[in-house]
Image (cartoon, rainbow, N blue to C red):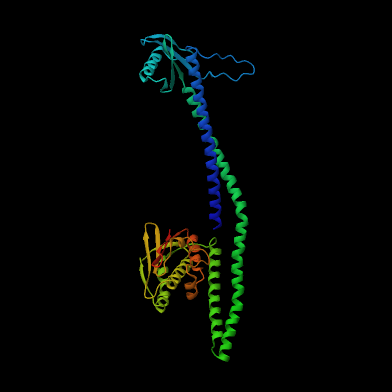
């Protein structure tokens, strides 16, 4: 659980920082591109106003930089009302006369006041002699923008690497108090469960002796019943504590899963019969897996115990084991109170019970499914829950 919490912390932190970094880089990219476009538009407008001449580069003290950067190459064409070429001015561009004529023809064909021809942008203006078409080559600015974007990508990747390292370190510091509290909680549950076993055993023994001396009565019967319920709760708590504690140190080995499931079902056939239920098995043979057989047996016991307790009388409990590719799938289904969509996400929480009155009748404490979840997590598997309220519930365990 702590490992998942730490991973979730890192994912949330990194996602937030990634969105922030992407927003900053995107804003910078849009701003720079808009700035380049505005500079080219100002340059073209100046060329139209100056009748094809490039804007002067004179810089006076205290004045802002000129609006005609040297990296923008411009040229112009003057055309009379009849469409004849009057003058070609190459400006500071190295474009050939043939290319200039072709650009002019394309601009006239487009018929717009401004536009783009590949990397060449143009603007037209009316003049006494006809019109002038000013052109500006934006290829150099495109190259500069491309290099800037590549630089931003590199900066972004380096920043993400640094952020991952810092997020990992900070997550460990942030999760450490939670981890310590969780470990103390597990230790408290285990220690208190052990400590409670002795006084409960003494109470149960004294109740038996007292019953032999004075005979049965209502008060002794209730005392013994509640003692047995408390013993069952302590047993479940100890099992949960042992399962969670063993998760990191357990040694997996190859074993016959089909045999383990069959062995776990056999004792419950008698239990189900005594409660007016029956167990129907559909177990594929010779399915093996790598894991802890004892834990899988505890998992099956918890699932079957839950199925017997919460199934309706004269109904069947279905147990299936089959393989699908590399996956081993165990399904346990029973008819009865079922489960609603809102309850599915809480079933595996400690001490959660869908029906408190029914749980008191059956002696359930809401720990069995927590044990199941702990064992499945230990085996890197997952649990799927299906069901309808008042109809049925199915637990599907998927193991590798």
Location of residue 258 with respect to 197 vertically, above or below: above
Q: Quadrant of residue 176?
A: bottom right
The residue sitting at the front extreme is 128
Count of marks placed on residues: 0
| Frontmost residue, 261 versus 374 | 374
Residue 333: x percent and y percent? 39, 67
| Frontmost residue, 319 versus 27 | 27
Residue 130: x percent and y percent? 41, 11
What residue is at 61 percent from the left and 67 percent from the top?
Answer: 188
Location of residue 128 with respect to 342 vertically, above or below: above
What residue is at 46 percent from the left and 23 percent from the top?
Answer: 139
Regarding residue 97, the answer to whether it shows in the image is yes
| Frontmost residue, 221 versus 158 | 221
Q: Quadrant of the N terminus?
A: bottom right
| Frontmost residue, 58 versus 230 | 58
Residue 192: x percent and y percent? 61, 71
């Amino acid at each position: 659980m702590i490992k998942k919490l730490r991973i979730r912390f890192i994912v949330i932190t990194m996602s937030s920082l990634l969105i922030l970094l992407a927003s900053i880089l995107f804003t910078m990219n849009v701003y720079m591109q808009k700035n380049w476009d505005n500079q080219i538009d100002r340059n073209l407008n100046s060329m139209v106003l100056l009748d094809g001449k490039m804007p002067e580069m004179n810089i006076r003290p205290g004045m802002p930089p000129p609006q005609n950067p040297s990296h923008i190459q411009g040229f112009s064409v003057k055309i009379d009302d009849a469409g004849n070429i009057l003058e070609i001015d190459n400006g500071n561009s190295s474009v050939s006369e043939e290319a200039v004529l072709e650009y002019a023809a394309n601009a006239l064909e487009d018929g717009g006041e401004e536009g783009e021809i590949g990397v060449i942008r143009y603007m037209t203006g009316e003049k006494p002699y006809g019109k002038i078409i000013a052109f500006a080559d934006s290829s150099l600015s495109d190259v500069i923008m491309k290099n800037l974007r590549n630089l931003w990508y590199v900066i972004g990747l380096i920043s993400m690497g640094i952020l991952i390292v810092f997020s990992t370190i900070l997550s460990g510091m942030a999760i450490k108090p939670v981890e310590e509290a969780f470990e103390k909680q597990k230790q408290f549950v285990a220690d208190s469960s052990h400590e409670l076993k002795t006084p409960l055993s003494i109470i149960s023994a004294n109740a038996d002796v007292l019953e032999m001396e004075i005979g049965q009565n209502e008060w002794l019967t209730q005392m013994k019943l509640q003692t047995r319920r408390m013993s069952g709760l302590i047993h479940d708590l100890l099992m949960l504590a042992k399962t969670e504690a063993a998760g990191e140190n357990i040694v997996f080995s190859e074993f016959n899963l089909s045999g383990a499931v069959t062995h776990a079902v056999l004792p419950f056939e008698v239990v189900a019969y005594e409660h007016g239920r029956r167990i129907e098995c559909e177990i594929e043979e010779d399915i093996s897996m790598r894991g802890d057989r004892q834990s899988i047996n505890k998992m099956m016991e918890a699932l079957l115990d839950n199925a017997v307790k919460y199934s309706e009388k004269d109904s069947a409990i279905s147990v299936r084991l089959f393989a699908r590719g590399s996956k081993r799938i165990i399904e346990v289904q029973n008819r009865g109170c079922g489960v609603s969509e809102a309850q599915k996400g809480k079933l595996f929480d400690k001490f959660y019970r869908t029906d408190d009155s029914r749980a008191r009748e059956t002696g359930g404490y809401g720990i069995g499914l927590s044990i199941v979840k702990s064992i499945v997590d230990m085996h890197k598997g997952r649990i799927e829950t299906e069901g309808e309220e008042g109809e049925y519930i199915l637990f599907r365990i998927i193991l590798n």
